[in-house]
Amino acid sequence: MSNIKLIIEERAASVGNFMVGRLLPFRQKRMVGPFIFIDHMGPAKLNDHENFDVKPHPHIGLSTLTFLFEGSILHRDTLGNAVEIKPGAVNWMTAGKWIVHSERTPEYLRHSDKNMHGLQIWVALPKELEQMEPEFFHIDQEQLPAWEVDGTQFKLVAGEAFGKKSPVPVYSRLFMVEIKSSIRQTINIGHELYGEVGLFILEGNIENDGNTYQPKELLIANESSLCDFTIAADSIIYIFGGETFPEERFIDWNFVASDKELIKTAKQKWMLQAFDKIKGDETEFVPYPSIGKK
């Protein structure tokens, strides 16, 4: 019997002036462990007059994880951070009670051809930490635990798994693991995982119970302890998940909370433009959408 509970295919969505493939939330699966939002950005080629520009916008109740495969993004926020995100590094921003940030192509790349490819992820905070002070951390790729087993390369992007711990300062029990294989082989890692498990195929394919799954598909496992599959040669996948929260989480645009009143207050504050401005990016902002939600 297959351990695949649900298959989620990317759905087109717009972020600023950039089209992405949305994976979470999905109508049949709102969260995987504490992971509540995942966008696959690209791969896209931008010419010398096209740039990635997500204007200043707010968040509450979550941590954002930005992980690039190609390209570069300049992150700015109301804590005063201005950090360039490059492939393999992790940008981890915890909004807590509120934060405003922007994501743009760095100035030195704005007039040249460039590529953009990566993942934008939101991780919901535990109820008791939804109103914590905002934080920001940038972790270089050399700091992430990486190892190889029988021709398969593993990298622990965030959380704890395989007896290892990522330096990304997460606030609940979770994991995000990159797996690259140069050869076709069967992988059995269920005993290393816990909670809910999702598997995103970036390149190549995997097989499970006679079925083959392709890139741009997110597979949700029935049970973490049964996580075994055959990975094709030259494949790259990401496995993520963790323990679920006892309370429901609500999403309205860029706001996440267990209490709708927190979202209502943040929404009103943003519409009044009562949040602090980002130094160096003060003039523009993303308005609260009058129709539809992000």
Image (cartoon, grey):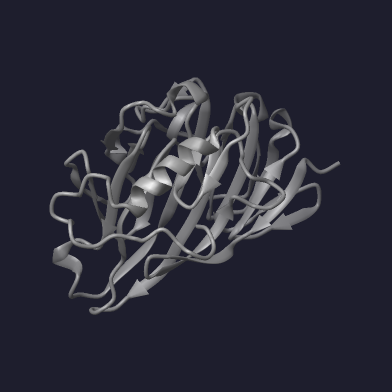
Q: Residue at x 35, y 46 (%)?
A: 269
Q: From this view, report whether residue 266 is shown above or below residue 272.
A: above
In the image, 238 versus 24, the foreground residue is 24
Which residue occupies the foreground of this view, 85 or 276? 276
What residue do we see at 40% from left, 48% from top? 268
Q: Could you tell me residue 228's position as x and y percent?
A: 70, 37
**Which quarter of the picture shows residue 70?**
bottom left
Residue 161 visible at all: no
Name, please, the residue furthest toward the right. Answer: 1
Is 293 left or right of 113, judged from the image as shown? right
Q: Residue at x 55, y 34 (%)?
A: 34
Residue sitting nearer the eye, 120 or 142: 120
- The residue positioned 71% from the left and 28% from the top of the image is 225
Position of 175 compared to 245: left or right? left
Horizontal and vertical percent position of residue 6: 74, 49
Image: 232 above or below 170: below
Residue 249's x, y, as percent?
Answer: 58, 37
Viewer-nearest residue: 218 or 95: 95
Q: Quadrant of residue 169?
A: top left
288 vs 197: above or below:
below
Visible residue check, residue 244: yes
